[in-house]
Amino acid sequence: MRHAAPGLGLLLGTLLGGPALAAEPADVPTVHGLALYGDPRLPADFAHFPHADPDAPKGGSLVRSAIGSFDSTNPFIIRGTPATGLTEIYDTLLTQNPDEPFSMYGLLADGVRLDPERQWIEFDLHPEARFHDGEPVTAEDVVFSFETLTEKGQPFYGAYYADVIDVQALDEDTVHFDLADSESRELPLIIGQLPILPAHFWQDRDFEATTRDALLGSGPYRIGEVEPGRRIVFERVDDYWARDLPVNRGRHNVDRLVYDYYRDQTVALEAFKAGNLDMRIETSARNWATAYDFPALEEGFVKRLEVPDGQPAGMQAYVMNLRRDKFQDIRVREALNLAFDFEWLNRNLFYGAYQRTESYFANSEMAAEGLPSEAELALLEPHREALPERVFEEPLPIEHPEEMRPRLARALELLNQAGYVVRDGVMTHLDSGAPLTLEVLLFDSQFERVVQPLLQNLAKLGIEGDIRIVDVNQYLNRLRGFDFDIIVGSFPQSANPGNEQRDFWTSEYAEVPQSRNLIGLSDPVIDELVDTLIAADSREALDTAARALDRVLRWGFYVIPQWHLGQTRIALWDKFGWQEPFPEYNLDLAAWWVDPERGAEIESRQRNR
């Protein structure tokens, strides 16, 4: 369904400086993509993403590891443990160029119309779009997907799309979304990220129940094999309806994507070295420095890459659960922060590979530094009485003693101020008589050696700490019920944070099972700062709001920040090809391919395949 150029009424209203008239869809041009600020970098007639090779060969397989187990092929619901890689079978309305900070281009959508006042957005679907069973993808499927995911899916979807007030199918291939007056610049773009599900497939199925069926999508891959808890295989769809679209040309080249499940990362590493896996993204600095000295690498069959990562580092941290009374006192939380010795870990366990994470938006312009700017103060001053004075009076990064002895001395002072004393070697609350004990919940034994030094420092303060390692399913169940003291959690950030921040930090999601508000934050000040960030109408306003939010979160000592690395470490059997330079913002493995000659040679060298 096509629409005309902007109408005279809208044009005159703008020229005369009066209030903008509500634009009718017929008055809004249809475009090929959207950018958060300005226009998309690539023109309407672009042939392919710059990092993709349109002549890349098809074929071969990519076998990777997953950790733990799975019992479901539905990744959208609270129940069950979903298999890895399931998004490969679904298309979205728009798709992102990994080489731009936040620009979206048409995938299922052949064209997009966005109201200049951002009160609505419309998508024209490709008439040739098809699910894997040959049924067309229609506007009714989009409506079904939105309503089903926001009403029956994980809490994330309700938070992400909270400002969509209505969605309608105008005809078979045109869908219209009405947007609340939230001023969220990213909302139109993230609507484009909505995975589109087949309404006819789910008509007689319970969407909220776990399943092991090969679910139906319209994407570049379909589910080929399911061995619950052991393996899932995705097969490239030869007649994929969108294979020749510019956003896909030169991508989705590998015939079979396989995820084999292993108990933990140690076993998975050995499987890679034995040739049972093709690729490994290495998260352990010790492994990267010491574990790849084996014959296949020395003989040139295996290679290692370090790919720069242009995204903000986000926050990986020991997350304290505010739903536990012992973490309610900010002095206790700061004392626990003081007991963490990053420099010792980096020197003795990490081979100096990491940087200490100070900010929730580390490695970006959104990280707060020094004292609040005038623009930040404009957001913070209305909440002065509700915030610690240090937010206004002390610069960031937070200054703590560097050496551990004075750090622990300061931690002891804070604990005493919070009403704790050491009795018979045990940190005990004066009023209740309860000892201060902590349990760190893990699902991977690889992290145990990293946690032990923290617990040893806490023991010097009389705090008894314990590590509980459980299987992945039990871990996820405990997370869903927020049944933990401390976990190792992460809050990933993009270059353009927005609606997902609600799920991370706001009161509405503090008690919603499986929300990403792991901390249990319920603070009106933080709620308002998140709303301000989402409504930012310029890059400057977004950065300011992010810095103000970052400042408040950091002075709350809700987590013990860990570390980050500005690159992705990849070990692989040398059968893959790719085009450089890599995209600036996201690693796009979909643009890689298996070299037919090297693939045959490598696979003859790999064992047990």
Image (spheres, rainbow, N blue to C red):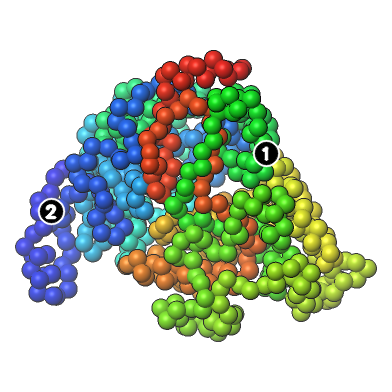
Q: Residue furthest left?
A: 8
Give the Cα distance between marks 1 and 2: 63 Å
Q: Nearer the viewer, mark 1 or mark 2?
A: 1
What kind of element bears circle 1?
A: helix
Q: List the residue tagged with mark 2.
A: 26
Q: Which part of the image, by quadrant, shows the N terminus?
A: top left
Residue 472 percent location from the top left of the image: 66, 40
Q: Residues within 10 Å of mark 2 (few under 14, many from 20)?
A: some
Residue at position x 56%, y 73% from top? 396
What kind of element bears circle 2?
A: helix
Residue 104 percent location from the top left of the image: 31, 48
Count of numbered marks: 2
Residue 112 percent location from the top left of the image: 23, 48
Three-letter code, disc 1: Thr
State the residue in front, 444 or 587: 587
Residue at position x 74%, y 47% from top? 448
Left or right of 174, for residue 531: right
Image-quadrant location for residue 474: top right
Please say if 190 is above or below 239.
Answer: below
Image-quadrant location for residue 564: bottom right
State the residue in front, 184 or 394: 394
Three-letter code, disc 2: Ala
Residue at position x 78%, y 77% from top? 413
Q: List the residue tagged with mark 1.
A: 290
Please say if 330 is above or below 71.
Answer: below
Q: Earlier in the sequence, mark 1 or mark 2?
A: 2
On the question of residue 171 being in view, the answer is no
Please say if 392 is above or below 588.
Answer: below
Please say if 277 is above or below 207.
Answer: above
Residue 438 percent location from the top left of the image: 77, 59
